[in-house]
Amino acid sequence: MGQYPEFDQRLIGWVNHIKAQSRAGVHVPSEFVSLDYVLHDIRLYKSREELKLMRRAASISARAHQQAMRICKPGLFEYQIAAEFDYEFRKSNAVHAYSAIVGGGANGCILHYTDNGDPLNDGDLLLIDAGCEVEGYASDITRTFPVNGKYSAAQREIYEIVLAAQKAGIRKVKPGNHWNDPHNAAVRAITRGLMEIKLLKGSLARLIKERAYRKFYMHRTGHWLGLDVHDVGDYKVGDQWRLLEPGMVLTIEPGIYIPAKSKGVRRKWWNIGIRIEDDVLVTRDGCEVLSAAVPKTIQDIEALMAG
Ligand code: GLY
Ligand code: MN
Ligand code: MN
């Protein structure tokens, strides 16, 4: 209601049409009830058939990400990698669920980068956030890997922090935990990791309370996933975080972004932008990572890229 003015006009038109017949004893509706909430709640719990489509979307996207890792090398352009996703998706009768982000080096630190036009340089990372949809059902996957196939020492250190945060977030996806548990776990792991490499200084509890991590991790850890990539559904019930229940699907996508010239940050960390994102289904006794087929440990990614 109120989202499609043309439809709202038609609805009022129908009511007026009925009103015109009221003297003939026709009952005129006196209330409008918004069904958004009911519909959104239905969309939150995926049926077996819906999950089939989401698994298929995740597996097509996973294949495209693997292919991108295989073909990537210095000298290619971001759009050439992006084209692999177009091809892999269309080949399977799928389409992009959102504009793909293919960002090398400094571009990996730009959260909504979609120009995808720059060359990929030796020594840089490549951040790819791309996912397809199948019959309307979306997938949403991010991986970050070295253009030349080998993470540098500095890239490795940041990568391991983001990976630990992502795993900590996924461990919290289970029935009975609430919506914000994975985010809290990821924030804790990122803050601890940034303290270990001295990018944050102070006590863990204080840094979390003061949200010091936001200098490097400025977005949330996920969102509902379904017919929309940022799907409908309440995140809170009243003023309490929603409890996770079997059949819900969400993303877990922590990141660390360190643009060049970041104040108080040594040059060796500059232009490292890393996000790792998976699609996670809440199951009866925990969770299932629908996008698990894309490698995400340093060892597995380097092995795939080495061919
Ligand atoms: N690709 C959009 C998102 O990660 O939320
Ligand atoms: Mn996402
Ligand atoms: Mn994404």
Image (cartoon, helix red, strand yellow):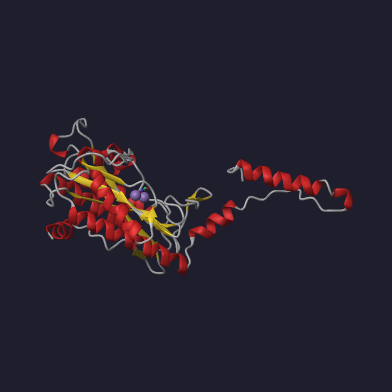
Q: Position of residue 303 (x, y in %)?
A: 14, 60
Q: Residue at x 30, y 53 (%)?
A: 85
Q: Nearer the viewer, residue 142 or 243?
A: 142
- Count the marks: how many? 0
Which corner quadrant holds the C terminus? bottom left
Q: Nearer the viewer, residue 178 or 73?
A: 73
Q: Position of residue 285 (x, y in %)?
A: 38, 69
Residue 203 in sight here: no
In the image, 251: left or right of 69? right
Q: Residue at x 18, y 51 (%)?
A: 72
Q: Residue at x 15, y 59 (%)?
A: 299
Above or below: residue 27 compared with residue 120: below
Q: Position of residue 231 (x, y in %)?
A: 46, 52
For residue 38, which quarter of the picture? bottom right
Above or below: residue 242 compared with residue 77: below
Above or below: residue 253 compared with residue 209: below
Residue 181 in sight here: yes
In the image, 46: left or right of 188? right
